[in-house]
Image (cartoon, helix red, strand yellow):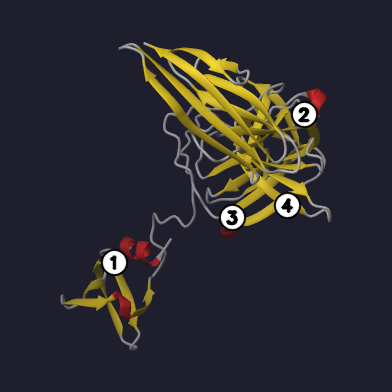
Amino acid sequence: MSAEKILQKYIDQVIQLFTKEGKVFEGKLLSTGGNVVLEKKDGGIQSIAMANVLNVDFPELPAGLITRPTLVWYLSNEKAGTHTIETSYLTGGIGWHAEYVALVNKDETTLDLSAWVSIQNQSGTDYEGAKLKLVAGDVHRITPPPPVYTAYEELAMEKVASAPQFKEKAFFEYHLYTLQRDATIKNNQIKQLSLFPTATTSVKKIYEYDGSKNEKKINVKLEFINAEENGLGLPIPAGKVRVYKSDEDQSQIFLGEDQVDHTPKNEKIRLYVGDAFDIVGERKQINYKQLGDRAREETWQIKLRNHKKEDVEILVIEHVWGDFEIRESSHPYHKKDANTLEFLIPVKKDTETIVKYTILYRW
């Protein structure tokens, strides 16, 4: 409801306008906009600039003007007595997503993973004492509503952490999380609820170099298995993972963040948290031969420089195509798939290691 909408509802009805100069105008409203046009009792026309209007007096709230989001059902009952009716409908403006916090230990061998669900309500109404069920999975919608991006600071935020609050089960081809108590979700509120208790799992740090995508940078990734023997073994809904590490004074330093997809139990999760400061890569083609019309030979050189105080292993990724043959290689490699080669290269502290291979393409 706004003054402009009320004015539009009063077209062809009598209103009073009070201007900043203290003048009063009364008449039938003909149009609104930059100016308000009134028809006087004697048939004359008055145009008043809306910028000069101080107050507008309306006799009553016009019919058909809804002051808050409202749903109206018309029901036909041909059976005597009082009946209870349950209604079910889809609404927009409310949704949820998962968020995770991963705290890496001092030796970077384990991490503590805690999970939250953030429920954002912009539907225009409160839900008092609601039974909350969250579906995790790729649910197909023909015309999904566009996402609503609202800064968190513009909304009331409530965070609730306690014992396990959700009960999880497989449901159709998804996973259903049911809150084990009633919840009140206010309009324009983000409510965060703990999805599962903090779990500790072993983790492996991986240095990954893909020189065809970024010639200099070495990606740092954290990898763990979502398995029960590793402290997890839970369906992980898609969401953002923020990674921290405790400093000597126990302050938690932000390391980076990544987005994870829906991940079932016993599957691998690899988080890209940032790029290594003290490890540098360099990739270039050092030889090229055209061998007739349907073959060519290429030689690639990859330099890896480790300026850290400890030895490291770097996973080098090379992308290939078509019918190929590795003619010569300075280091052993693993063929991950038809178009990807992986070299696991040890690099001692304060040294440079050079990887070189020659590849033959036929077509």
- Earlier residue among tags 2 and 1: 1
Frontmost of labels 2 and 1 is: 2
SS for dot 1: loop
The residue type indicated by label 1 comes to Gln
At label 3, counting other C-alpha atoms closer than 10 Å, the crowd grade (few under 14, some 14-19, many 20 or more) is few
Left or right: 107 with respect to 304?
right
Residue ID for mark 3 = 152
Q: Label 4 crowding class (10 Å Cα cut-off): few <14, some 14-19, many 20+?
A: few
Which of disc 3 and disc 4 is earlier in sequence? 3
Of labels 3 and 1, earlier in sequence is 1
Q: Are marks 4 and 3 in contact (CB under 8 Å)?
A: no
Residue 109 x/y as whole percent: 79, 35
Packing grade of label 2 (10 A; few <14, some 14-19, many >=20) is: many
Give amino acid for label 4: Ile
Choose between 317 and 229: the one closer to the eye: 317
**Which residue has dot 1 on it?**
13
Three-letter code, disc 2:
Leu
Query: What is the distance, in whole Å, between disc 2 and disc 4 at their CAs?
Result: 24 Å
Mark 2 / mark 4, whichever is N-terminal: 2
> At which x and y percent is residue 156?
63, 57
Is residue 86 visible in the rendered structure shown here? no
Of the numbered discs 3 and 2, the one sitting upstream in the chain is 3
| Marks 3 and 2 close (CB-CB < 8 Å) | no
Residue pointed to by mark 4:
253
What is the number of the mark on residue 272?
none
Reading the image, the residue beneath label 2 is 232
Residue at (79, 32) in percent of width and height: 201
SS assignment at label 4: strand
Label 2: element kind? loop
